[in-house]
């Protein structure tokens, strides 16, 4: 419900102008008030370490440096030019990043559109028409009434009388009507409704920006991990081919011994079965490699037929020896997902103010200035000008608890956003702690796997030498071959896991986007 008061309509005088000026001043003075809670940036947790035992370096060629900043191009620490090239190509051509950038534009221009509501709105109306009325005087009277309703007759400022229209002088005569009007309206933001809306939209713009940073970080991490996985698969393929070559060599020895009658046919067949089993493991690995190549091609923003040129092997990827680890208190400022959750909390806080301001009175001021005449040449003649000043005050009285429930909903949404923010922070600390502990365990796993492979290789070499002279049973040969094959695969997987967990730590710490050169921005 609302109440509208016309300050002055088509009359001159000081009193109406004074009332309009007074109301405008009052509305402007009230426009500084903003209802609703003000957003307060959450404080990060006061945590000395990510884990209870502290941040201990894993050793075995890798150490943590706590407090050192993370470089924006953290993947360069793997010292692989093909990897660096692929990551930059993905950042340049991946359409997911383009979509995230477009989302920033949507949010930004929505905020800019809302900013315009804070200013007066000005419009121009121009109407030109030629009319011919019926000779019926009764119909002419009705048309005259409608004519006066929509196009009030301009007052002659000399005589104080309205200028007669053609409908009153000659109902059957054609006539023209020319109207030029300037309209100005302004809604003073008394309770901060428009400003809270702008605040919410600006927070959504910030959220979209941090979501873009999160998308960049996820893309770079996915490319690095996918490249490491390809290198792991290639390593497993090489290990499988290596054991196949060993099995074939052993089979030749057994065939010679069988031809001399030194061993039974069963020993030869058993070796053939072991060779077939090893060869059976090769196609699934080759399939994984082909699928991994498709994944890397898609991450680079290419179609599957346009495969990337880069190929990755574990020997070409160097383990980052020095790994910077951020101070725990800085994590909330570095993780894009935490910053996005913070911006969402900001928007939810502003939404409460929007809901509360919607329940309070609102005032709209408007003014119309113009001239109307029956001939274009008369538009600027004395007596054709008119103006209208008006003020509209609206206050909801009864809406079935609609606005109150909307405010309660906004408060509940704020509580939800706050809980989501705290959950995001907890998950972030968990991610970092998981990555730190994984790397500590990975160092031990890699060291153990390498020792196991070396021991298995020495054992297999001894058994193969004994096999040539018939000094060892076939069971011992099978056992040594199986142990070496398993140890080789485990060593490759352990090294790849350590490389991937290092990338996971960089991702968990935020990826260093705040250090990025503006020229590197997508």
Image (cartoon, helix red, strand yellow):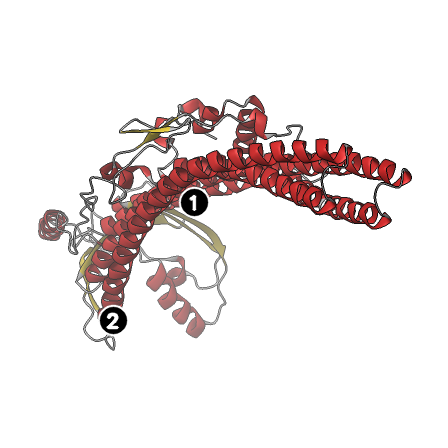
Viewer-proximal residue among 126 and 239: 239
Q: Along the horizontal axis of the image, is 402 left or right of 310?
A: left
Dot 1 falls on a residue whose secondary structure is: helix
Q: Residues within 10 Å of mark 2 (few under 14, many from 20)?
A: few
The residue beneath circle 1 is: 106
The Cα–Cα distance between marks 2 and 1, rounded to whole angstroms, is 29 Å
- The answer to whether residue 185 is above or below residue 233 is below
Q: Please state the horizontal and vertical placement of residue 351, each as a whole percent of the image.
A: 26, 56
Disc number placed over residue 405 in the picture, else none: 2
Viewer-proximal residue among 464 and 341: 464
* Camera sees residue 485: yes
Q: Please state the horizontal and vertical placement of residue 193, each as a whole percent of the image.
A: 22, 54
Q: Along the horizontal axis of the image, is 32 left or right of 327?
A: left
Q: Please state the horizontal and vertical placement of residue 474, each as a whole percent of the image.
A: 74, 45
Q: Along the horizontal axis of the image, is 493 left or right of 57?
A: right
Dot 2 falls on a residue whose secondary structure is: helix
Q: Residues within 10 Å of mark 1 (few under 14, many from 20)?
A: some
């Amino acid at each position: 419900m609302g109440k509208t008061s016309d300050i002055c309509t088509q009359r001159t005088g000081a009193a109406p102008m004074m009332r309009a000026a007074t109301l405008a001043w009052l509305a402007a003075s009230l426009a500084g008030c903003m209802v609703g809670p003000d957003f307060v940036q959450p404080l990060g947790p006061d945590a000395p370490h990510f884990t209870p035992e502290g941040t201990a370096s894993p050793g075995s060629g890798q150490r943590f440096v706590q407090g050192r900043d993370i470089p924006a191009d953290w993947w360069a620490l793997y010292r692989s030019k093909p990897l660096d090239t692929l990551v930059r190509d993905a950042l340049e051509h991946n359409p997911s990043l383009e979509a995230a950038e477009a989302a920033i534009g949507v949010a930004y221009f929505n905020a800019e559109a809302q900013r315009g509501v804070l200013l007066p709105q000005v419009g121009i109306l121009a109407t030109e028409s030629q009319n011919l009325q019926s000779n019926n005087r009764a119909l002419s009277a009705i048309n005259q009434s409608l004519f006066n309703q929509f196009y009030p007759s301009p007052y002659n400022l000399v005589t104080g009388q309205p200028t007669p229209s053609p409908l009153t002088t000659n109902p059957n005569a054609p006539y023209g009507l020319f109207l030029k009007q300037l309209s100005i309206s302004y809604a003073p933001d008394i309770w901060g409704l428009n400003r809270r809306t702008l605040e919410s939209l600006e927070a959504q713009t910030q959220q979209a920006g941090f979501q873009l940073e999160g998308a960049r970080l996820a893309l770079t991490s996915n490319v690095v991990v996918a490249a490491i996985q390809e290198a792991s698969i290639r390593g497993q393929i090489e290990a499988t081919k290596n054991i196949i070559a060993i099995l074939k060599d052993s089979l030749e020895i057994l065939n010679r011994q069988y031809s001399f009658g030194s061993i039974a046919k069963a020993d030869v067949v058993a070796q053939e079965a072991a060779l077939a089993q090893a060869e059976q493991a090769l196609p699934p690995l080759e399939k994984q490699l082909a699928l991994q190549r498709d994944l890397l091609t898609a991450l680079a923003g290419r179609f599957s037929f346009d495969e990337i040129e880069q190929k990755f092997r574990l020997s070409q990827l160097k383990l980052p020896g020095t790994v910077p680890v951020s101070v725990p208190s800085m994590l909330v400022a570095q993780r894009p997902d935490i910053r996005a959750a913070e911006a969402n909390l900001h928007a939810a806080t502003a939404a409460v103010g929007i809901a509360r301001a919607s329940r309070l009175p609102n005032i709209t001021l408007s003014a119309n200035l113009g001239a109307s005449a029956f001939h274009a040449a008369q538009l600027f003649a004395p007596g054709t000008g008119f103006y209208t000043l008006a003020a509209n005050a609206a206050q909801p009285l009864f809406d079935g608890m609609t606005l109150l429930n909307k405010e309660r909903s906004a408060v509940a949404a704020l509580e939800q956003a706050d809980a989501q923010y705290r959950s995001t922070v907890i998950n972030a600390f968990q991610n970092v702690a998981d990555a730190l502990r994984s790397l500590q365990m990975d160092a031990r796993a890699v060291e153990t796997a390498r020792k196991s492979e070396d021991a298995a290789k020495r054992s297999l070499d001894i058994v193969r030498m004994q096999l040539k002279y018939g000094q060892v049973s076939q069971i011992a040969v099978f056992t040594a071959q199986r142990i070496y094959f398993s140890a080789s695969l485990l060593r490759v997987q352990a090294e790849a896991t350590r490389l991937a967990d290092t990338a996971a730590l960089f991702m968990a710490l935020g990826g260093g986007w705040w250090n990025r050169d503006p020229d590197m921005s997508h």
